[in-house]
């Protein structure tokens, strides 16, 4: 499915268009050029063309629920407004029974997935994190547990003395079925040092996902953009993900996360532009040729821009969520969640076909 692209593009852009249409991989230099180009429409059209070949007009969503067992964290990442110190006002650590009670108050019959992340709370043992999953799985056996970031898994190895493989296997026994994509931020140790990303380094992040894939898990992966990183940093991040995907084929979706300011009253100049958000989604689609889906995360970029992103390479809009906390703690102005009806409207309003999926992109219902 080839879309008409203006003939008035420069020679470098024409070369990139030709490479993409011939199935050739884009290089670091190609990706940086796309970021530095002001031809957003050509980049978007090309990404749309690639997505239509991969996924047709289908756009996926899931009925899921975000859960946060604890906001107590040993790390002090510069961009995080979710974490608390032990004993600080607003800090909490829920037991499995308390979380089950919370879920019972908010769950509805359509929920297929619990999306579970939280702080790196070193005031509780690793067994706490195992038991947290087990409590949910025992009470809601039909709901998929997509839990913990690679950074959390690395943290668990330090508080347990177990290897990455052993930690993952213990969590699998408790009901873990997939990892979330968070903790990647920008895969550059220099960036991580400057942004005080006091958690898993680049090699550790990648190794956790590699090990999870070797154990048969399919996982998600992210990129948090819009801070101090360069365009080259972003492309190098994508290339590292692409390389691991070549090796394991374990990533289901790539999720560009637009950096949020520290509070909701932050001015427009403290937020990524819509132009930058759309360009990042489109470039992600073009660079990551071996990952099936690119997600437009409405929590960070808003509902209407998410609709536009569906013609810029995105094929997934996440899910119902119910009550998102991390981005909103940092100043997100978007809804904390959407209903199934709203997600269907969002997708259909962009001229696409809504597809309800499970965690692993098995199709549950197509809304035509």
Image (cartoon, rainbow, N blue to C red):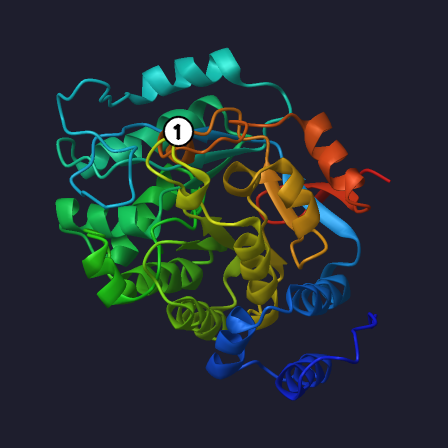
Instruction: Identify the residue at image location x=67%, y=58%.
Output: 312
Lateral position of residue 61 relative to residue 252, left or right: right
In the rendered image, residue 77, in percent from the top left (x then y), is placed at 23, 46
Q: Quadrant of residue 283?
A: bottom right
Residue 140 visible in the picture: yes
Q: Is residue 232 above or below residue 299?
A: below
**Front residue of 183 and 186:** 186
State which quadrant residue 2 falls in: bottom right
> Horizontal placement of 132 versus 365: left or right?
left
Which residue is most to the right?
368
**Towards the viewer: 279 or 172:** 279
Residue at image point 73% right, 65% down? 45
Identify the residue shown where x is 55% and y is 44%: 297
Does the rendering let one see residue 253?
Answer: no
Residue of label 1:
265
Callout 1 secondary element: loop
> Which one is in front, 253 or 136?
253
Residue 162 pos. (x, y %) = 18, 52
Residue 330, how many percent across, how many down?
Answer: 36, 34
């Amino acid at each position: 499915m080839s879309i008409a692209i203006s003939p008035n593009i420069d020679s470098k852009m024409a070369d990139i268009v030709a490479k993409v249409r011939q199935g050739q991989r884009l290089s670091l230099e190609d990706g940086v050029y796309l970021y530095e180009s002001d031809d957003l429409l050509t980049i978007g059209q090309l990404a749309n063309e690639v997505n239509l070949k991969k996924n047709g007009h289908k756009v996926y969503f899931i009925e899921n629920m975000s859960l946060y067992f604890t906001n107590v964290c040993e790390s002090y990442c510069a961009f995080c407004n979710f974490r608390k110190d032990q004993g600080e006002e607003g800090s909490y650590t829920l037991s499995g029974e308390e979380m089950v009670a919370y879920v019972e108050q908010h769950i509805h019959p359509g929920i297929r997935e619990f999306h579970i992340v939280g702080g790196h709370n070193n005031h509780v043992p690793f067994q706490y994190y195992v038991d947290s999953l087990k409590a949910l799985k025992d009470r809601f056996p039909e709901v998929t547990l997509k839990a913990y970031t690679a950074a959390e898994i690395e943290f668990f190895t330090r508080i347990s003395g177990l290897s990455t493989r052993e930690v993952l296997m213990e969590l699998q026994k408790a009901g873990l079925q997939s990892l979330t994509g968070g903790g990647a931020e920008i895969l550059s140790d220099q960036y991580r040092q400057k942004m005080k990303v006091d958690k898993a380094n680049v090699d550790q992040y990648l190794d956790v996902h590699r090990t999870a894939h070797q154990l048969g898990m399919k996982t998600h992966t992210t990129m948090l953009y819009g801070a101090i990183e360069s365009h080259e940093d972003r492309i190098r991040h994508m290339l590292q993900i692409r390389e691991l995907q070549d090796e394991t084929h374990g990533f289901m979706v790539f999720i560009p996360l637009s950096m949020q300011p520290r509070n909701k009253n932050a001015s427009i100049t403290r937020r990524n532009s819509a132009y930058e958000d759309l360009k990042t989604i489109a470039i992600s689609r073009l660079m990551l040729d071996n990952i099936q889906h690119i997600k437009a995360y409405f929590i960070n970029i808003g509902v209407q821009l998410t609709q536009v992103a569906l013609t810029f390479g995105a094929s997934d809009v996440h899910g119902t969520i119910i009550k998102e906390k991390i981005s909103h703690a940092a100043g997100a102005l978007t809804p904390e969640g959407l209903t199934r009806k709203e997600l269907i409207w969002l997708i259909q309003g962009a001229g696409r076909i809504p597809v309800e999926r499970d965690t692993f992109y098995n199709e549950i219902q197509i809304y035509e």
